[in-house]
Image (spheres, helix red, strand yellow):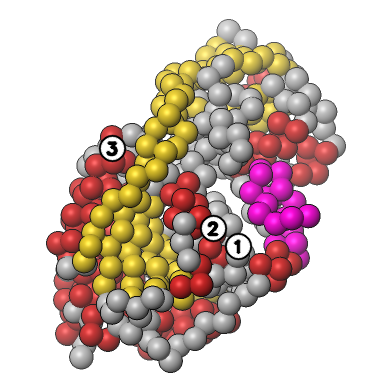
Amino acid sequence: MTDWIGRTFTSTTGWDHLEDLVDLGNRMAGTEGERRGAELTREALSEAGARDASIEEFPIQGWERGTSEIRAGETVQDCIALPRSPSEEAEGEFVDLGYGLPEDFEESDVEGKVVMARSDVPDHYDRYIHRREKYYYAVEGGAAAFVYRNHVQGCLPPTGSVGTPEEPIGAIPAVGVSSEVGARLARRFEGDELAVGVEAEIGDATSQNVHAELGPETDERLLVTSHVDAHDIAEGAADNGAGTAMVVELANALVDREDELETRVEFVVYGAEEVGLIGSEHYAANADHDAIEAIVNNDGVVRGRTLEFSTHGFPELREAAETIGERFGHPVETIPQQGPHSDHWPFVQWGVPGYHVMSDTGEQGRGWGHTFADTLEKIEVRDLREQAILLTELVVHLARDDVEIERRSPEAIEADLEDENQAEGMRVIGDWPYDD
């Protein structure tokens, strides 16, 4: 009964796939690299033993990086464009808003100015503020351009998309700068005129989702998901090559346990997550939500040894994760709050039970993610294998007929977002799905 554990802990299936993905280089949404990553994932799922492995295409707003720069005084400061920034140049007085909290924008006149905000929040603050929220506070205030400063040291400018579902290309030029460049700008150029320029190719593009299945052909299904796209500046090992490698490893392990599955397990590896959850939005718009028993979304796994489960207020999901952790004597962490920034969200926002599975790194924000440093050597094969064992057991547990997870109403999810002080930011970035 436990032979599968030994096979999973010695398996190279997931790790081999992770190496294949990072060696592709650029997996930006809508590129040939993303397409090749999807094809490799389809092949890996099929070779693992999942059935009906296929690719489904859908259109997206394309964006390909050109050059970008900040001209300050007689200097040119290093920066990178934030994806879906418009391809244009803007000038204005430079103002450093520090953390870029909502109150910082309320108390400052940013009209016509080049605004810089950090990528973190202070320890005392009650919630994380997403990059896009800070960007759209700048837009609402009439800023000329936006500069996003990494809080992680190491000369690493951060990337990450802007834009909204209605207007996928942002309203003002946006660039990321390293912590060190940000400190230099704040020290030398506060109050001076700066120019921010972005060049990019903008047009139509195509992305794709990968599908495969295991288990009985029931109408109900359990989704095991990740995203294969990554930002074009790095290998995308942690975000989210490791998540896709985990899905492949889970398929490999579940083939050994297929006779224990009492509900169909569908593996879905999404495209275009990094530019607005486009792949999962496409799937969710065409899916029967009532047939989805639960979602296990792997985005941020393997970065640390302890698994972290955002459970979105579903008590049965919290209990299941803790039960599996106790069964194996392995620590897990559960977070009850809503987490609206990954591929489970297009379903969870309407009350479908879902996890966002990550790993605890002890850091705020993405760490190496969304920078040049998101590379393979940051990932440990031991963590991939250990977490695959825990998640395989979790999937088998959730797929049992006698495990029932009560749905939540959209009104309950909406109330949680209000209580957690997340609603305001979601409205600002155009991600609020409910009628006010």
Q: Is residue 257 above or below residue 341?
A: below
Q: Is residue 387 above or below residue 235?
A: below
Q: Secondary structure at mark 2?
A: helix
Q: Secondary structure at mark 1?
A: loop
Percent x, y of residue 290: 51, 72
Q: Secondary structure at mark 3?
A: helix
Percent x, y of residue 42: 23, 54
Mark 3 or mark 2: whose residue is earlier in sequence: 3
Q: Which residue is mark 3?
A: 33
Location of residue 358 by image quarter: bottom left
Quadrant of the drawing holding the C terminus? bottom right
At 30% from the left and 83% from the top, the residue drawn is: 261
Q: How many marks?
A: 3
Q: Amino acid at mark 1?
A: Gln
Crowding at mark 1 (Cα within 10 Å: few <14, some 14-19, many 20+):
many
At 66% from the left and 67% from the top, the residue drawn is: 410
Residue 346, label in figure: 2
For the residues bearing labels 3 and 2, Cβ distance under 8 angstroms: no
- Looking at the rendering, the stretch of residues picked out in magenta corresponds to 417-436
Is residue 429 shown in magenta? yes
Location of residue 428 by image quarter: top right
The answer to whether residue 81 is left or right of residue 268 is right
Q: Which residue is mark 1?
A: 349
Distance between mark 1 and mark 2 Cα atoms: 6 Å
Q: Nearer the viewer, residue 139 or 67?
A: 139
Q: Is residue 99 above or below residue 95?
A: below
The answer to whether residue 396 is left or right of residue 283 is left
At 80% from the left and 44% from the top, the residue drawn is: 103
For the residues bearing labels 1 and 2, Cβ distance under 8 angstroms: yes
